[in-house]
Image (tube, rainbow, N blue to C red):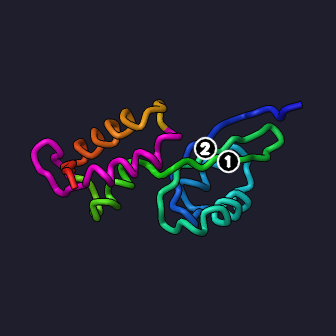
Amino acid sequence: MAKEVTGKIKLQVPGGQANPAPPIGPALGQHGVNIMEFCKQFNERTKDRPGEILPVVITVYKDRSFDFIMKSPPVSASLKKAASLAKASPEPGRNLIGKVTKAQVKEIARGKIQDMNTAKLESAVKVVEGTARSMGLQVVEE
């Protein structure tokens, strides 16, 4: 028989850097989850991806046990890394602050497609291009 789910928690945590400080501690504490156990398991699974922002969905069960699923990094984080930027443009429609190539966009779309609501690579590429434009990035041919 399956365990009874009491909650789902969605967080974005840097790889290998989970600790009981906010936002992790309060989010898990209110559900009665062992915070240090989550941090230990998460850091162990993500030790090869230090500092990379990783969305995680934690399922909490009635007996206060949990399991979690890690997703691929957000498209915006991947675009910032590809364009070597610290943050996006404050005025995306007016100020272009960087460029990404079609090849980089396609590679980001390939990595993110399993978390998107599309199965076609062309559609995923369009989603990534739209995110790039909304961040003030120009998509250029090689």
Amino acid type at mark 1? Phe
Vertical order, 30 against 86 (above or below): above
Is 90 colored magenta in this rendering?
yes
Confirm or deny contact between disc 2 and disc 1 (CB under 8 A): yes
- Badge 1 marks a residue whose secondary structure is strand
* Start-end of magenta stretch: 89-115
Measured as percent of width and height from the top left, residue 93 is found at 14, 42
Q: Nearer the viewer, residue 32 or 140?
A: 140
Residue 35 lies in quadrant: bottom right
Residue receiving disc 1: 68
Q: Residue furthest right?
A: 1
Is 54 colored magenta in this rendering?
no
Q: Residue at (32%, 60%) from the top-left corner? A: 82
Q: Nearer the viewer, residue 6 or 16?
A: 16
Q: Residue 57 carries which label?
A: 2
The N terminus lies in which quarter of the figure?
top right
Amino acid type at mark 2? Val
Measured as percent of width and height from the top left, residue 106 is found at 36, 47
**Which comes sooner in the sequence, label 2 or label 1?**
2
Q: Is residue 23 left or right of residue 42?
A: left
Q: Residue at (47%, 62%) from the top-left corner? A: 52
- Distance from the alpha carbon under mark 2 to that under mark 1: 5 Å
Vertical order, 65 against 130 (above or below): below
Q: Residue furthest left?
A: 94
Q: Is residue 69 left or right of residue 78?
A: right
Q: Residue at (53%, 40%) from the top-left corner? A: 114
Mark 1 surroundings: few (<14), some (14-19) or many (≥20) residues within 10 A = some
